[in-house]
Image (cartoon, rainbow, N blue to C red):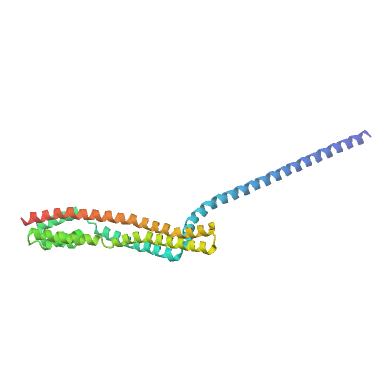
Amino acid sequence: MKKLFALLAITGILTFGISTQVMAQEDANAENVEATEDAVEEVVEEAADLETDTAVPVEQERGFHQVLKDKFIEGGAGWMAPILICLILGLAFVIERIIYLNLSTTNSKKLLMSIDDAMKNGGAEKAKEICRDTRGPLASVFYQGLDRYEEDIDIIEKSVVSYGGVQMGRLESNLVWVGLFIALAPMLGFLGTVIGMVQAFDAIEVAGDISPTVVAGGMKVALLTTVFGLIVAIILQVFYNYLVSKIESLVDTMEDATITFMDIIVKNKR
């Protein structure tokens, strides 16, 4: 009988221990599942935040061009197209002038030294060959003076000065068109603004009420033409000032080099 009670007691203890262990394991598993679900939720939230943060710069980067395009379309093709044409033609003349002025730049000191050496060794004909082989208006001016080498100094000087004026005119060629587009672009913008304001007041008259929607929409479209016209004028004005400074630099170089050239001519004629 004692053995039976002992066996039952041992069986009960084992059963209670096993059940307690199973329950503890289940609780641990439940806690692990909850922790895993919480971790998954945190990862998902972090991924969503990261995606949002990444999408914002892309939207902003894309938004500038899109906004510029939308504003250009809102301004109306009838007024925005002429302003865009002013920008395109103005930049075309600017590029042409920049290329021409860069090709017209000459190392005046090197050219004068070559002419001086040629005059000492081969005379005026050899110096003329050097001028023919040299690119730029300065060499052309020197060639005109050497072509009249046998005549008096006054005639040579007048020839050099006269042809120098011709070359200065060529340097400034097409620059007036850039100035025209600088003035024309904002004028077209202002004209579009005035006409847009008139249309806005017409819409107010038709509606019979000064509502913010009617006034704001018409004024926004009207002012967009002025904004784009001023932007075009600012861009072209920067390039225009660069071209003017480049031309002034070339003219100063030509005048200084011409004085040295006349000294070479006088020295060799003696």
Q: Quadrant of the N terminus?
A: top right
**Is 28 left or right of 81, judged from the image as shown?**
right
Question: Could one spot residue 130 in this view of the protein?
Answer: no
Give x and y (percent) for residue 134.
20, 60
Q: Position of residue 137 (x, y in %)?
A: 21, 60
Quadrant occupied by the C terminus:
bottom left
- Front-most of residues 214 and 113: 214
Pinpoint residue 119: horizontal percent, then vertical percent.
Answer: 11, 57
Up-down: is 11 above or below 182?
above
For residue 89, what is the image quadrant? bottom left
Q: Residue furthest right?
A: 1
Which is more toward the observer, 178 or 32?
178
The residue nearer to you, when weighing 246 against 8, is 246
Residue 242, located in which quarter of the rendered image?
bottom left
Q: Quarter-wise, where is residue 145 in the image?
A: bottom left
Residue shown at the point (54%, 63%) measured from the top left: 207
- Left or right: 270, with 197 as reference point: left
Does residue 17 appear in the picture of this structure?
yes
Frontmost residue, 80 versus 130: 80
